[in-house]
Image (cartoon, helix red, strand yellow):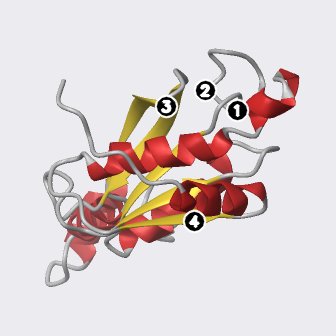
Amino acid sequence: IRVFNGMGMGTTMFSVWRSERPKEKPIEDGLAEWMDVQLKSAGRTQEVSFQTEDGWTLYGTLRTPDSTSEVTAAPGVILIHSSFTDRHIYDHLAETMVKRGLTVLNFDSRGRGKSIGKGELLDLPPDERNKTYIDARAAVNFLSALPGAGRIGLLGADRGATYALRARRHPVQAPREL
């Protein structure tokens, strides 16, 4: 937040600035440049959904660096939350990673957040809850099927780390043509 004392109220400050400082860059130019940098560094965000091999529809947020029009060979990261949270626990981390040039898929695993089509996680039978690693594998399949996808890493904390490790022990299926 920038405060300009004695410059008037509202947009009056723009004309007062130009009048009092004719050789300096106008405030609106500086504000537009700052806003441009802030918004572009946040990358592009889109809501996505994909299917698991056992029929769950999972929802997530795909963030791509602003330097690309589509996903390019930028490395990708899949964020896997724990059993007691949802994807939004990683929102700030996802934004930070995108600012560093990574493509990030942050999704809700089965029974959490928006991915509750077959029920809430803690209400599911234990054998169904233990299949969450399939969600991580589906996320890898989804991200790797995007045009120009590069290397993919999995990052999880708590149970999310367990799901990531189990997903890697099972081979990822090649994307199928529709």
Residue ID for mark 4:
155
In the image, what residue occupies the spot 26% across and 71% down?
Answer: 30
Crowdedness near tag 3: few (<14), some (14–19) or many (≥20) residues, C-alpha within 10 Å: some
Q: How many marks?
A: 4
Q: Quadrant of residue 178?
A: top left
**Mark 2 or 3, closer to the camera:** 3
Q: Quadrant of residue 142?
A: top left
Taking 22 as reference, is 14 above or below it? above
Q: Which mark is residue 115?
A: 2
Label 2 close to label 1 by CB (< 8 Å): yes
Rounded to the nearest whole Å, what is the CA distance between mark 4 and mark 1?
Answer: 17 Å
Query: Tag 3, which secondary structure?
Result: loop
* Earlier residue among tags 4 and 2: 2
Q: Is residue 177 visible?
A: yes
* Earlier residue among tags 3 and 4: 3
Rounded to the nearest whole Å, what is the CA distance between mark 1 and mark 3?
Answer: 14 Å
